[in-house]
């Protein structure tokens, strides 16, 4: 990046990309940490969640998540159907002489 301060009469300043590199390295480290959880870590997390919330609470929560996913899919399908219906009802208002040009 090049910064210039013409009102001060100073020469342009070139900023190095070290800050961007440091931020990218930090993101890479975070991603590596998430990739290294593995099966034992996931099992430990599942056991902790089960102990904290109990079997009944988790099963009811998963049931609600399933209902939400089903409702979302139904809404998407209804939206697609509505768009297709509106496109089928659309009239072609192009003048006849314009249609012949194509």
Image (tube, rainbow, N blue to C red):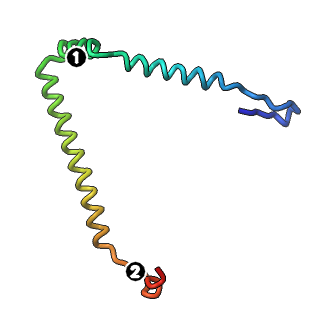
Give percent across and percent down for residue 93. 40, 80
Indicate the secondary structure of the residue bearing disc 1.
helix
Residue at horizontal 14%, vertical 32%?
Answer: 63
Distance in Å between CA atoms under marks 1 and 2: 60 Å
Nearer to me, 98 or 19:
98
Residue at horizontal 23%, vertical 12%?
Answer: 48
Which residue is identified by label 2?
A: 93
Give percent across and percent down for residue 4. 79, 34
Give percent across and percent down for residue 61. 17, 28
Which residue is identified by label 1?
A: 46
Give percent across and percent down for residue 69. 22, 40
Tell which residue pokes out farthest to the left in this image: 56
Mark linked to residue 22: none
Q: Is residue 45 left or right of residue 9?
A: left
Q: For the residue carrying disc 1, how many other residues have a C-alpha within 10 Å: few (<14), some (14-19), or many (20+)?
A: few
Q: Given contact means CB atoms under 8 Å apart, are the residues at marks 1 and 2 in contact?
A: no
Q: Is residue 28 left or right of residue 3?
A: left
Indicate the secondary structure of the residue bearing disc 2.
loop
Q: For the residue carrying disc 2, how many other residues have a C-alpha within 10 Å: few (<14), some (14-19), or many (20+)?
A: few
Residue at horizontal 42%, vertical 87%?
Answer: 96
**Rendered view: 44 above or below 68:** above
- Residue 2, picture quadrant: top right
- Residue 50, picture quadrant: top left
**Rendered view: 78 above or below 92:** above
Q: In this view, does 1 lie to the left or right of 40?
A: right
Number of on-image labels? 2
Nearer to me, 89 or 7:
89
Please report whichever mark, 1 or 2, sits nearer to the chain's N-terminal start.
1
Tell which residue pokes out farthest to the right in this image: 9
Residue at horizontal 13%, vertical 28%?
Answer: 60
């Amino acid at each position: 990046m090049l910064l210039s301060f013409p009102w001060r009469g100073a020469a342009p300043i070139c900023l190095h990309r070290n800050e961007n590199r440091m931020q990218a390295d930090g993101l890479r480290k975070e991603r590596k940490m998430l990739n290294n959880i593995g099966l034992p870590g996931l099992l430990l997390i599942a056991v902790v969640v089960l102990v904290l919330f109990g079997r009944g609470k988790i099963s009811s929560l998963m049931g609600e998540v399933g209902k939400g996913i089903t409702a979302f899919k139904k809404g998407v399908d209804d939206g697609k159907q509505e768009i297709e219906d509106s496109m089928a009802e659309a009239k072609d208002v192009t003048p006849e002489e314009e249609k012949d040009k194509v």
